[in-house]
Amino acid sequence: MADSKDLVAGIDSNAKKSPRRIVFITRRTSAQVKADTEDQLQTFPEVLFRAAVAIQVLAIVLVAIALMFNAPLEGLADSSHTPNPAKAPWYFLGLQEMLHYFPPVVAGVLAPGLVVIALIVIPYFKVNIEAEGFFLKDRERRLRIFYAVAAGLMIFLGFFHVLAALVPTLIMAGFMLLASQSSPQSSSAFRRYLAARPLSYWVMTWFLFELVVLTAIGTFFRGPGWSWVWPWQGS
Amino acid sequence: MAKTVDQYFDDLRGTRVWRSIFRSGTGSSTLKRALAIQQNVFLHLFSTKVRTRMLSFSATWYLGTLTLGTFLILVATGIPLMLYYHPSVPQAYADTKDLQFVVSSGLFLRNLHRWAAHAMVFLVFAHMFKVFYRGAYRAPREFNWVIGVILLLITLLLSYTGYLLPWDQLAYWAITVGSNIASAVPLMGNKIHFLLLGGNAVNANALLRFYVLHCMILPLTAMFFVAIHFWRIRKDGGLYSHASEPATLRARAASGAAAGKEAQ
């Protein structure tokens, strides 16, 4: 409980002596009245049972996949024969796609490093996913900042010809623009939803969108020499 | 009257040997059920009660539980795979071929391990985004979010180190491409690259290093952080639900009291 910190006594004690208990009774101490009680289930056996069922379902699905599809196995590793393209595991293909546009120190070190640092510091900054809609307060100023940041980002991506990242950015900017033109009183439920999204939602969703698009492009749309290939063309 | 299965199980739980192993006794009282969690070294990581609303599928999509599930499957399939595998060149490839064609159920074991590994990477990402969009990273749960990010990186490393072990063309070149990125680190890139691979290129040393990382160091590190991750859920007040937060309850109580005063 967050409140209990206020009750900690600030007296240093001798760690080598058996501690003595002292009770402080302040006047006008009253029993705390719980504001609300909420239904709870006992972990044993209810929650453990549900977890077991969830894991069972997962196991059945994975066993079915394992019975139907074989893991890939190619020829013996050969350092003198480079396949074209040489691809990293799928979860790194977003990174490899970035490597296509930027020097390795930017795409391979700086970008992922910054992403990890950004993820770690999220809870320590005032990132609040439950905050009010971004454009609902101080609308003019925030709209100007949005225009500046979006334009800067697009010029940067356009300058390096990063079409794969530019298109998702354009789409997200479009949604944000729609959000800025919407309000909680909008007639369409979708626009009411957009209007209520805070800044942290927009930034994270943009990141998720880029992650999915870049990974998908690296996985399905890249062939020899990292050229653009349609999935049905084969490699 | 014939005994039911439940009664036999209760009798078993009452025996001296059972009682010497499990500290909680028999019985179906609230206390005994709480003790079954609290008096068990593994289960005591969890709280004895969970809010009913957090058990609905929509609350968490069970993504954390499912991630644990993939990890358990990976341990269960990974250990038998180790029995048939030598981390040496070119024996590693021959062993993988044997698993594919000679060892009974070897193909199934390898398939399950491979697909469960992909599922785990996917589920860890899904879990992270779900936690973010729920706002469950916020105080007092900041540090558990950080541990989650560490677990994400460990999961990626586990998958990445496992990728090399079959020693086929796919494995070799994927690791070559990936490890070359390490060389791009300013100043000490080549040193890191050398340390990672035990040489200047992917070779037998790299295979051994990745094997030790994959089967020993990374799983143990993952378990260490998973234990803290679970334990912190309990210590930080259970699964996050905006409606159940102390701040929300206080605000509601205060507004309720104010409304009551106005009514008087």
Image (tube, helix red, strand yellow):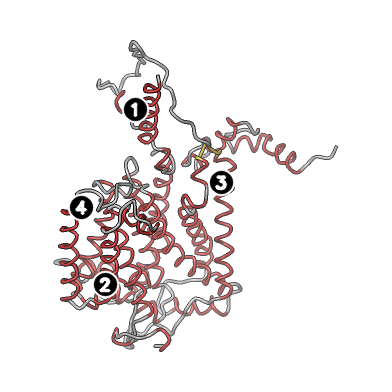
Q: Would you call the spot at circle 3 few (<14 residues within 10 Å), some (14-19), or many (20 or more)?
A: some
Which disc number belongs to residue A210?
A: none
Q: Position of residue B117 (x, y in %)?
A: 45, 66
Q: Nearer the viewer, mark 4 or mark 2?
A: 4
Task: Please tell me which of labels 4 and 2 falls first in the chain.
Answer: 4
The quadrant the N terminus of chain A occupies is: top left
- Residue that mark 1 sits on: A4
Asked if disc 4 and disc 2 are in contact, CB closer than 8 Å, the reply is no
**Residue at 23% across / 47% down in the picture?**
A125
Assign a secondary structure to mark 1: helix
**Residue at 44% across / 67% down in the picture?**
B118
**Compared to B216, does B21 lie above or below?**
above
Q: Quadrant of residue A21?
A: top left
Task: Please tell me which of labels 1 and 3 falls first in the chain.
Answer: 1
Q: CA distance from mark 2 to mark 1?
A: 48 Å
Which disc number belongs to residue A139?
A: 4
Q: CA distance from mark 4 to mark 1?
A: 40 Å
The chain containing the residue under callout 3 comes to A
Q: Amino acid at mark 2?
A: Ala
**Residue at 46% across / 57% down in the picture?**
B67
Assign a secondary structure to mark 3: helix
Q: Nearer the viewer, residue B92 or A151?
A: A151
The quadrant the C terminus of chain A occupies is: bottom left
Marks 4 and 2 on same chain: yes
Q: Amino acid at mark 4?
A: Arg
